Image (cartoon, grey):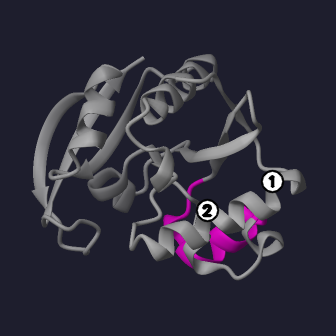
Amino acid sequence: MNKLILIRPTKEYEKQVMNYKKAFIENNDSFDGCAGLEDVSSYDEWIKFEERLSKKYGNQYVPSDVYLAIREDDNKLVGIIDYRHDLSEFLFNYGGNIGYSVLPEERRKGYAKEMLRQLLEKCKNLGKKKVLLACDKENIASVKTIICNGGILENEINDDVGLTRSGTIQRYWINI
């Protein structure tokens, strides 16, 4: 696997982010960890995370940090990962502190595992002791990524909100 760095979104990556969105739509993928990329029509709209997402979620909104996973050797966006500082009731039940996704053509290369590893280091530096991650029970790649980074399955719940294909959400805690 080529080396990745997590960086905050900048205008330099506008075209790559919008192409990322296009690839996810064409692949009929869910936009996990993409900070509402599916809801916007432009990069300038997307980059206004706090303003846009606080309007959308109201009192369920929690501040988050969004990072682009950039492959160093060619400066290519391969994934997006989002760290939600707190857990609203919805996030506690269905979403967790961290969401992530990898560009369809870049999957099965270990990028999600590395993205999560790096983000857990950032969480540790912020003084976090543990984080919650949730995923579709049938998303074996995500299950493996979480477990490889220390995830411990707490439980499975019915997906009453339509986030998964399987209808079952697995909730994992990672001690940092």
- Which one is earlier in the sequence, the residue at label 2 or at label 1? 1
How far from the left and from the top, in percent, is residue 35? 59, 61
Left or right of 151 on screen, residue 99: right
- The tag on residue 13 is 1
How far from the left and from the top, in percent, is residue 136? 22, 54
- What's the CA distance linking mark 2 and mark 1? 10 Å
Image quarter in which the C terminus is found = top left
- In depth, the one of 58 and 14 nearer the eye is 14
Is residue 58 among what the camera can see? no
- The tag on residue 20 is 2
How far from the left and from the top, in percent, is residue 60? 49, 66
Please tell me whether residue 99 is drawn above or below residue 119 in the rendered image: below
Label 2 crowd (10 A; few <14 / some 14-19 / many >=20): many
The residue sitting at 56% across, 19% down in the picture is 121
The residue sitting at 53% across, 32% down in the picture is 115
How far from the left and from the top, in percent, is residue 164? 24, 65
The residue sitting at 27% across, 50% down in the picture is 135
- The tag on residue 85 is none
The magenta span reads 47-62
Q: Quadrant of residue 95?
A: bottom left
Q: How many labels sit on residues? A: 2
Left or right of 137 on screen, residue 150: right
Label 1 crowd (10 A; few <14 / some 14-19 / many >=20): some
